[in-house]
Amino acid sequence: MTSDFKKKDWSGQKRPALTATQIVAKLAHVDGWQLDGDGASVAITKTFRFANYFETIAFVNAVAFVAHTQDHHPDLQVSFNRCVVRFNTHDVGGLSVSDFDCAALVNGLLVTKAPA
């Protein structure tokens, strides 16, 4: 298991909200994620598509593992061949570094095949 998946505990740490400039800079480093909402409900979201329900649920379970280890839980919208993942940090009323760290880890769950 990599060090990225060590259980985090945010109970004794304060996560500051990111500024608009910081959000734009971090968004450029998480492929496919978009801003959604505004104010305290601002979030980053990404839609992941799959061939079937089994693959979708396997992905959801992997996201749950990441969320548990990071102690940062997204909203998930799950359907037959699609899952929308939405991260924000409720206790800061916006986005924090945790949202972007988790987005990068979720992106890393899907390995694309190298060209033959």
Image (cartoon, helix red, strand yellow):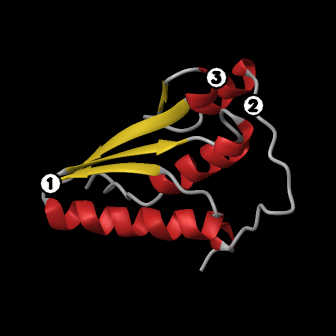
Judge whether 73 appears above or below 16 on screen. below
- Which residue is located at x 37 percent, y 69 percent? 61
- Which residue is located at x 62 percent, y 21 percent? 39
Judge whether 27 appears above or below 63 on screen. above
Q: Tell me the element at label 1.
A: loop
Cα–Cα gap, marks 3 and 1? 32 Å
| Proximity of marks 3 and 1: CB atoms separated by less than 8 Å | no
> Residue 33, position in %: x, y?
47, 34
* Count of numbered marks: 3
Q: Tell me the element at label 3.
A: helix
User: Taking 7 as reference, is 28 left or right?
Assistant: left
The amino acid marked with disc number 3 is Val
> Residue 112, position in %: x, y?
34, 54
Let me know if residue 28 appears in the view. Answer: no
Dot placed on the residue nearer the N-terminal end, 2 or 3: 2
Let me know if residue 98 appears in the view. Answer: yes
Q: Tell me the residue that label 3 is attached to.
A: 24
Q: Nearer the viewer, residue 46 or 30?
A: 46
> Residue 116, position in %: x, y?
25, 56
Q: Nearer the viewer, residue 10 or 60?
A: 10
Q: Tell me the residue that label 2 is attached to.
A: 18
- Which residue is located at x 75 percent, y 67 percent? 9
Q: Tell me the residue that label 1 is attached to.
A: 80
Cα–Cα gap, marks 2 and 3? 10 Å
Viewer-side label of 2, 3: 2
- Which residue is located at x 75 percent, y 31 percent? 18
The amino acid marked with disc number 1 is Phe
> Residue 11, position in %: x, y?
80, 63
Q: Residues within 10 Å of mark 2 (few under 14, many from 20)?
A: some
